[in-house]
Amino acid sequence: MLTLAVEDTGIVAITASDRLTEADYERFVPEFERIAAAHGPVHLLIELRDFHGWDAAGLWQELRFDMSHQHDMDRVAIIGDKAWQDWGTRLSKPFFKAEVRYFDPGQETEARIWLAAP
């Protein structure tokens, strides 16, 4: 499941949980596009909560989303609690124009400070 909200600070907060599917992206992408069009390149705070990855169609949608919306993201902070999530963040950096950083769950404040920095 993917949820998103624009916070008062301008940060776009996304929560990813369970196993993501194509249907999750069909709901998520139009909302993200509306927000990005209204706010320009956004700062994303992505929280991976009880996240179990993607099914095959969901992974394809994730890759399509990342490639087609690179210019809609300025900074991306990913908060997760598993070593593979940190590893995945590091592996994906070359494919993003946005600056991407991984944070552990206890570092949410640091993630928000980093996102808000000029």
Image: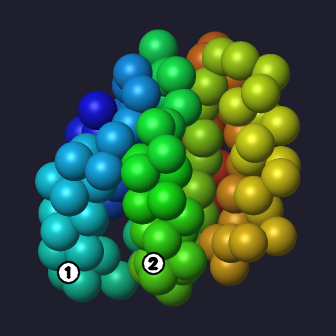
Q: Which numbered circle lies on residue 82?
A: none
Marks 2 and 1 sit apart, C-alpha to C-alpha, by 14 Å
- Residue 98 position within the rendered picture, expressed as x and y whole percent measured from the top left: 64, 72
| 90 up-or-down from 2: above or below | below
- Residue at position x 44%, y 68% from top? 65
Amino acid under disc 1: Ala
- Specify the label residue 38 is tagged with: 1
Q: Position of residue 115 (x, y in %)?
A: 57, 54
| Residue type at tag 2 | His
Asked which secondary structure carries label 2, the reply is loop
* Residue at (25% x, 74% y) in the render: 33
The residue singled out by tag 2 in the image is 69
**Residue 68 visible, this orientation:** yes
Q: Quadrant of residue 29?
A: bottom left
Query: Which quadrant: the C terminus?
Result: bottom right
Task: Describe the element under mark 1 as helix, strand or loop.
Answer: helix
Q: Is residue 12 above or below residue 75?
A: above
Question: Looking at the image, do the residues carrying marks 2 and 1 touch, with CB atoms under 8 Å apart?
Answer: no
